[in-house]
Image (spheres, rainbow, N blue to C red):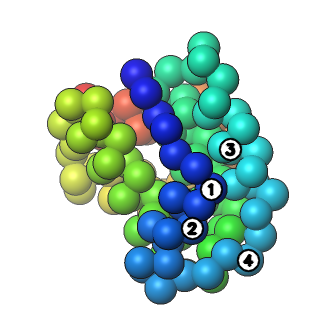
Amino acid sequence: MCMDISKEDLLRINKGFGGNLRSSSSLDFAIDTINKPKLGFYTKLAYLWRAILVDHPFSDGNKRTALFLAYAFSEENKKKVNRDLLIYQATSIAKKNLTNIRQIAWRLENAIK
């Protein structure tokens, strides 16, 4: 499963939601990590979600950016999304500052099948 996204892509997506970059270190780490070939779809998306939802690298639109990524990658990989559950998971991860990648990936897997 392919997940080809750059930091510039993330900045462009977030700018569409009215945000600006505040801190790039967590995004840089997530981008470097998702380029590892042995990681699966949900794990790669979990790294991006943690960077965006927990570390809040953007001034605005962090949850919207994370949801956009989930929709884009689920469409790219021909997976179905439970919209309400995905929104709940994004909000819950952000609110609880959940950093465990396995837990985030598990939540994504339940919302995207």
Quadrant of the drawing holding the C terminus: top left
Mark 3–mark 4 CB contact (< 8 Å): no
- Camera-side residue of 66 and 84: 66
Residue 88 visible in the shown view = no
Quadrant of the drawing holding the N terminus: top left
Residue receiving disc 4? 22
Find numbered disc 4 in the image and state the secondary structure of the residue it sits on. loop
Residue name at image x 62 percent, y 41 percent: 47
Q: Residue furthest bottom?
A: 18
Q: Amino acid at mark 1?
A: Lys
Few, some or many residues within 10 Å of mark 2 (<14, 14–19, 20+): some
Residue receiving disc 3? 30
Q: Amino acid at mark 3?
A: Ala
Q: Amino acid at mark 2?
A: Leu
Mark 1–mark 2 CB contact (< 8 Å): yes
Q: Nearer the viewer, mark 4 or mark 1?
A: 1
Q: Amino acid at mark 4?
A: Arg
Q: Nearer the viewer, mark 1 or mark 3?
A: 1
Mark 4 or mark 2, which is nearer the start of the sequence?
2
Few, some or many residues within 10 Å of mark 3 (<14, 14–19, 20+): many
Label 3 – label 2 distance at C-alpha = 14 Å
Mark 1 or mark 4, which is nearer the start of the sequence?
1
Few, some or many residues within 10 Å of mark 1 (<14, 14–19, 20+): some
Q: Nearer the viewer, mark 2 or mark 4?
A: 2
Residue receiving disc 2? 11
Disc number placed over residue 7 in the picture, else none: 1
